Image: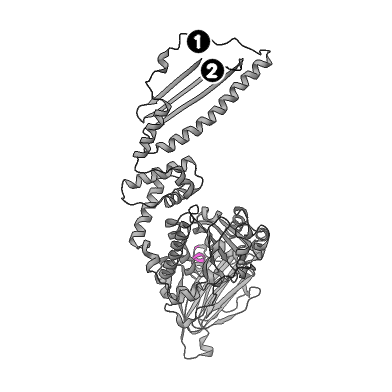
Amino acid sequence: GGRKSSGINAEYGVRIKEECSYKPHPDNENWTIFTQKATLNIISFFGIEAQVERLGLKAYHKNIKKGKEIIMHYIRELESEGVTSAPRWEASSVYSDSDSDDSFASADDDADDLQDVIVAEDYKLDSDYIHKHFGELSPMEECSIIQLAKRLKQTFDKIPDEQVLLRFLRARNFDIEKSREMLIKSMAWRKQYNIDSHLDFWTPPAVLERYMPGAWHRNDKDGRPVYILRLGHLDIKGMLRTVGEDALLRHALYICEQGLQKTKANNKVSSWTLLVDLEGLNLRHLWAPARMAMRRFTEVMEQNYPETLGVVLIVQAPRLFPLAWTLVKSFINENTRRKCLVYAGNDYLEEDGIHSYIHREDIPDFLGGPCPCDIECNGLIPREMYTRSTEDVLEKEAGLQSLYKSLTLKRGEIHEVTLEADVDAVITWDFDTVLGEIQFSVSQRIYTEPPQCNSSLAAMVEMAGITYPSAPSPSDSYKDTLVEDSTIETYQEGDSVQGSYYVSKPGTYVISWGNVAAVSKPVMQKSTFLYSIEIIEPKDYAGSVSSLTSSFSNLSSAGSTWNTSSVASWNSMVSR
């Protein structure tokens, strides 16, 4: 006996035919052969018929297995009740021969019809193409690529290849409309700046070629090309004051385009690996214009090169790294942060270090490996090569103009900024001496009696500081004491200073600049400088380090010891 059932959705042209049959086994009539088969024919379904058919067949295979489990369950139930046999089923007149008429095509006819539909389609992805270029994709991913391509073809004659479509889909969690919007903006950006020809026409300035410590270096274990950036040896401040931000961005785009070109050489690779060496990282790298430039670079990369980073290996992270990470993590999206693996000190050499991603024979020599790596580290860019002043750099960015304050002090004048800071906060400063000499110090103000002042006025003074015609007279109500490990320093015209102080005692802190040029150079009447001060609150700093040690799947063991105590009490660096 048997049972046939069929169904059709006329609106979308989905044909389903299922047949179940039961018959005695030819060798033993007490055994029953149960046969179940189905034909699924997707005549029309939004242009993704082949993908829907594969998805339907996979689901049907799961249902067959589940159906068998149900049958066996009831057989065991009958056996538990002592039933070991049943009378043979006899056909009745309920089901007539009309059930087997030609109202629906046979399975072979259905297959032929479906093949005609697929061949007639303008856009498709066959299984061989998918395996060659993508490896394994889920039916949902395949369908999404087809849908996005068809949506784009409604507007554009030429669209990016499927690798690009898949990257933008992943960046927007396979939301077709959001992916389409993001990709259209990126296509317009590429056209506006002629990015497709960037590899042919971009020639890096000589300064950039000589002082950019980065290069492509072999492939990782997954076949992804590896780009190495020795960030700790990059003079980012010198770069911004010689070639400028636009040239740096152009060079970053050049590297990204090279990466895309290299991934196409390996059909199953769509991303590359970034190895960042932080040996030599210092406060100079945290210069505010450099951070703002990095923010802009990151935005451009994430908007136009999504999902091109497979993994980011950060090695030789110094004690300064948690502070640096706190300052930059806000403009790196969560998905990219999850790809970052951080190794402090020499932990990258451990068994679970970078050997997990890069073949031992390809580890570069500067990291203790056997492979020569042709990356030049030529130090700081000479000041005589600068073409831009700090003011020129700041002029391009309104955010920087509001962050930095410009001040001119007459002979003998002192400018003080007072700050209230809690334990474990980090005070950072960044200033450039534009004209004359500047004397600089950081002190803690200890009050012998509670200060009496208007709170709103105090807040204004704290933000803007206050200038005195001469050094303030000693007061009976408070005493200023230099913070530990610090001294009063004098900086010359052209000096650029970045520094930080880890607060070990809560209270009021005073940062002061003074015009002392009159002592050594009576001719000089004025001193001009630009300054910026930031306080990283304990919750922000601790939260950053906490996320650092918990979010990264392969953080080195030393990373778990990173906390506010890892930052030296006093850090200050001057570059001339």
Q: Tell me the magenta residue range.
A: 456-460
Q: Amino acid at mark 2?
A: Tyr
Residue 195 sits in quarter: bottom left
- Residue 121 position, x and y percent, is 35, 40
Instruction: Bin the neighbour count of mark 2 within 10 Å (Cα to Cα): few under 14, some 14-19, many 20 and up.
Output: some
For image coordinates 48% across by 69% down, the residue present is 290
- Tell me the element at label 2: strand
Residue 322 sits in quarter: bottom right
Q: Nearer the viewer, residue 444 or 353?
A: 353
- Tell me the element at label 1: loop
Q: Amino acid at mark 1?
A: Ala
- Residue 494 position, x and y percent, is 49, 81
Compared to residue 116, the image places residue 64 above or below, namely: above
For image coordinates 36% across by 59% down, the residue present is 190
Instruction: Bin the neighbour count of mark 1 within 10 Å (Cα to Cα): few under 14, some 14-19, many 20 and up.
Output: few
| 448 lies left or right of 324 | right
